[in-house]
């Protein structure tokens, strides 16, 4: 799975008379939407689900094709011609759908808080991508660790990279989709190629105005330090024992390329600050 848009696609988004410019402007105005870059196409997400996929195919007139999943309409499934003025109807269909996953909705909130909310300039991680998969490995989110103090923000080289896994509730902590399973999956991702792709993806999103909290492009990542793998555990019940049991199973020696970490909330928010990211032993 690659990442990045060609110059024609970027022009269609950026230029005022570009075919896709109105969609970019809609996303930048409507913070319930999230635009993510794929392999020469884009997904626009709403409540964690893809409300529309655009490209890379074009029709006979040379215009990009749009796709909205008609299954969001349930039993009254129907095709819909995707236009800007149809977004309220499409949103309503998704609001009433049973297809949406709660974890992905929180995932989109984390993107908003750390990329373009009013506090985003002060957080220490910016989200470059979501739903990444490669080489049988996957991660909910990929973040750039770029600390928010003045000196760190001047530096564009040797930045950190973090894989993030979002889990909602205690039932999501074990078995095939639990903590151990996700660590094993993440261990399969080729980090070097991931860094190359995230540099392109992050810089293009910044050029599109989707990460206004960052004022410079990434120059390079640090290839010497380990990659952080951060768990964000939403609504853990302190009275339950699942979490303790699962983290006791983690053997850091099985994940030599990963720094296993856990995020805790900053007064109930979703901003990611280095002070609130604990390594495994401190979290235990």
Image (cartoon, rainbow, N blue to C red):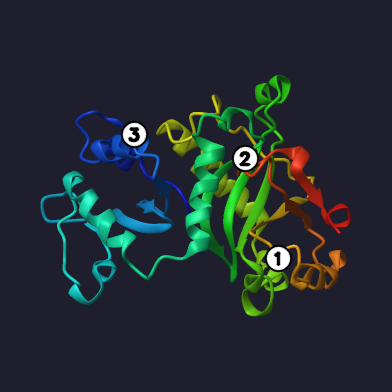
Report the front residue among 283 and 42.
283
Q: Are marks 1 and 2 in contact (CB under 8 Å)?
A: no
What mark, if any, has residue 271 been given in the picture?
2
Q: Which residue is found at the position 60% from the left and 53% from the top?
A: 194
Q: Which quadrant of the figure has residue 229? A: bottom right
248 displayed left or right of 102:
right
Q: Which residue is pictured at 22% across the width and 35% down the height? A: 18
| Residue 111 coordinates in the image, percent (x, y) | 52, 45
Looking at the picture, does residue 138 appear above or below residue 162? Answer: below
Residue drawn at point x = 71 percent, y = 35 percent:
158
Q: Earlier in the sequence, mark 1 or mark 2?
A: 1
Earlier sequence position, callout 3 versus callout 1: 3
- Name the residue that disc number 3 marks: 29
Quadrant into which the C terminus falls: bottom right
Q: Position of residue 47 (x, y in %)?
A: 41, 55
Question: Which numbered dot is residue 35?
Answer: none
Nearer to the camera, 247 or 12 = 247
Q: Are marks 3 and 2 in contact (CB under 8 Å)?
A: no
Closer to us: 27 or 223? 27
Secondary structure at numbered mark 2:
loop
Locate residue 274 relative to residue 13 in the image: left or right.
Answer: right
Residue placed most toward the observer, 243 or 123: 243
Mark 1 or 2, closer to the camera: 2
* Mark linked to residue 187: 1
Q: Quadrant of residue 271?
A: top right
> Taking 224 as reference, is 165 above or below it?
below
């Amino acid at each position: 799975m690659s990442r990045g848009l060609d110059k024609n696609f970027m022009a269609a988004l950026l230029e005022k008379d570009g075919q896709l410019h109105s969609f970019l402007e809609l996303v930048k105005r409507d913070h319930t939407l999230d635009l993510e870059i794929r392999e020469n196409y884009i997904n626009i997400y709403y409540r964690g689900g893809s409300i529309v996929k655009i490209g890379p195919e074009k029709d006979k007139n040379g215009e990009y094709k749009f796709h909205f999943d008609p299954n969001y309409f349930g039993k009254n499934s129907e095709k819909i011609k995707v236009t800007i003025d149809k977004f309220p109807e499409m949103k309503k269909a998704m609001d009433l759908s049973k297809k949406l996953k709660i974890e992905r909705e929180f995932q989109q909130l984390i993107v908003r808080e750390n990329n373009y909310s009013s506090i985003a300039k002060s957080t220490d991680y910016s989200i470059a991508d979501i739903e990444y998969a490669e080489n049988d490995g996957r991660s909910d989110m990929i973040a750039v660790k770029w600390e928010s103090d003045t000196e760190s923000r001047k530096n564009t080289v040797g930045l950190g990279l973090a894989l993030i896994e979002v889990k909602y509730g205690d039932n999501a902590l074990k078995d095939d989709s639990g903590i151990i399973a996700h660590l094993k999956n993440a261990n399969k991702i080729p980090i070097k190629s991931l860094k190359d792709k995230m540099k392109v993806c992050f810089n293009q999103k910044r050029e599109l105005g989707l990460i206004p909290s960052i004022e410079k492009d990434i120059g390079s990542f640090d290839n010497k330090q380990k990659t952080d793998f951060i768990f964000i555990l939403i609504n853990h019940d302190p009275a339950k024992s699942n979490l303790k049991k699962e983290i006791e199973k983690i053997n850091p020696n099985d994940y030599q390329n990963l720094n296993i970490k856990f995020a805790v909330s900053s007064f109930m928010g979703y901003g990611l600050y280095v002070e609130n990211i604990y390594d495994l032993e401190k979290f235990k």
